[in-house]
Image (cartoon, rainbow, N blue to C red):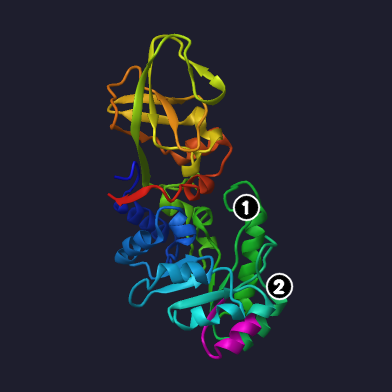
Amino acid sequence: MIPLRIMIDREALAANWRWFRDRAGVPAAAAVKADGYGLGARLVVETLYAEGARSFLVSTFAEADALGPPGAGAEVLVLHGFTSEEAPVAARLPWVRPVLNTQAQVAAWASAFPGRPADLMVETGMHRLGLAPDDVQAAITAVPVATIHSHLATADEPDNPMAEAQCARLRALAAAAPRYRYSLANSAAICRGPAFAFDLVRPGLGLYGGLPHPAARVRRVASIAARVIQVKPLAPGAPVGYGATWRAPGPARVATLNLGYADGMLRALAPALRFSAGDRICPAVGRISMDMIAVDVTRADVTEGDWLRLDFDLPRLAAASGLSQYELLVMLGRRFERVAA
C-alpha cells in the first residue's frame, strides 16, 4: 500500500472549469502542463473533456507525447514552440499544435509541416516568450495560424495598470488582423472582466483550487493524506526531530507521518502545516525531514497505521510560507498515489 495519497475531487475540478468558462463567456482551454499542475494530466483531461473542454495546454512536445490523445475533436497546444528535432514526435501527434514564439520556430515548422496549422505567441510587454508584433505578418504568411496568444505579467495584481496596457496592445493587433482567434487571459485575467477574454481563455491555477484573484470563486480540488508510521509518548521537555527545535511543553504524544520534503512539504511550510484526525486539528512540530513529518497528536485518538489528512489550503499555505500557490501544487512528488474522488 502506498502510504501517501492525493485525493482529487473531479466534480470540484469540473465546477472550477465551468466557472472560468462561464465567467469569460468564451471557450476555455485548460492548462495541464507540469502533469496537470502535479495532480495528473491524464485524469484532468479526462475529467474536463467530459465537461466539454476541447483545448488543452502543455509546455513541450514531450509532455504532449506523455499525455496521449485528449479525445475526439480535441487539441493539445504546446506553449514552448517547436524545434526541428521534435518533428518525429509532432508527426505522430496530429492533434497537437505548437504555439510558435520566434521567427526561427516559424521557419522550422513551415519547413517540417507545410500547410499544417500552428498558433503564435506575440510579445505585448512581459518580455518572456513571443514574436515582436512587427513579425506577426510574416509569420501568418509562412504558416496557417489558428490562434494568436499573449500572456500577462501582472494579471493577479488588480491595482497594476500593466495588464490593461498589454490587453490594449493585443486588441490593436486583433483590429489589424481580425480573421484570427485571440487569447490572453489566464485564471487571474479571466476574473478581471470580459475585456480580457478575447476568443479563448486559458485557466490554470484556478482549475486546481488555487485562488488567482479576489473575484475568483473556486472549490478546493486536492486533499492530501499520509499514514502514521509510529506514535510516541513524550515526557515534558523531550525533543523531536533534527536539531531538537521543538520540545514537548508537557506530557505529549507525537505521530510520525510518511511524508516529507521529498514529497513537496518543504521546511518553510512546517509552521503552517495542520493535520486533522477526526475533528481534532494536529499541528506539525519540529523540522520536516526528507521522508517524515512529526505531528502533535496529544489530544487526538491516533494510532500506528492511521491516516491523517493535511489541510491543503493553497492560499493560506502560500501566505504563511512565501511560496506561490503554483509551487505548492507542482512540488507534490511522484510518491503520492493520486486517487480520483
| Quadrant where the N terminus is found in the figure | top left
Relative to 192, say whether 88 is above or below: below
- The residue shown at (63%, 58%) is 164
Which x, y percent locates residue 233?
36, 16
Please tell me which residue lies in front, 66 or 320. Answer: 66
Indicate the quadrant where residue 320 lies.
top right
Please say whether residue 116 is one of the residues in the magenta stretch: yes
User: Of callouts 1 and 2, which one flags the residue occurring earlier in the amino acid sequence?
Assistant: 2
What is the three-letter code of the residue carrying label 2?
Ala
Please say whether residue 153 is one of the residues in the magenta stretch: no
**Residue 162 seen in this snapshot:** yes
What is the three-letter code of the residue carrying label 1?
Thr
- State the residue lying farthest toward the bottom: 114
Residue 327, numbered label: none
Q: Is residue 272 left or right of residue 100?
A: left
- The residue shown at (56%, 77%) is 86
Question: What residue did someone put label 1 on?
Answer: 154
Marks 1 and 2, how far apart in space? Answer: 19 Å
Q: Residues within 10 Å of mark 2 (few under 14, many from 20)?
A: some
Q: Are marks 1 and 2 in contact (CB under 8 Å)?
A: no
- The residue shown at (57%, 23%) is 243
Question: What residue did someone put label 2 on?
Answer: 132
**Residue 179 seen in this snapshot:** no
Which x, y percent locates residue 108?
63, 83
Which element carries disc 2, helix, strand or loop? loop
Q: Is residue 125 left or right of residue 178?
A: right
Q: Is residue 90 left or right of residue 311?
A: right
Q: Which residues are magenta?
A: 106-119
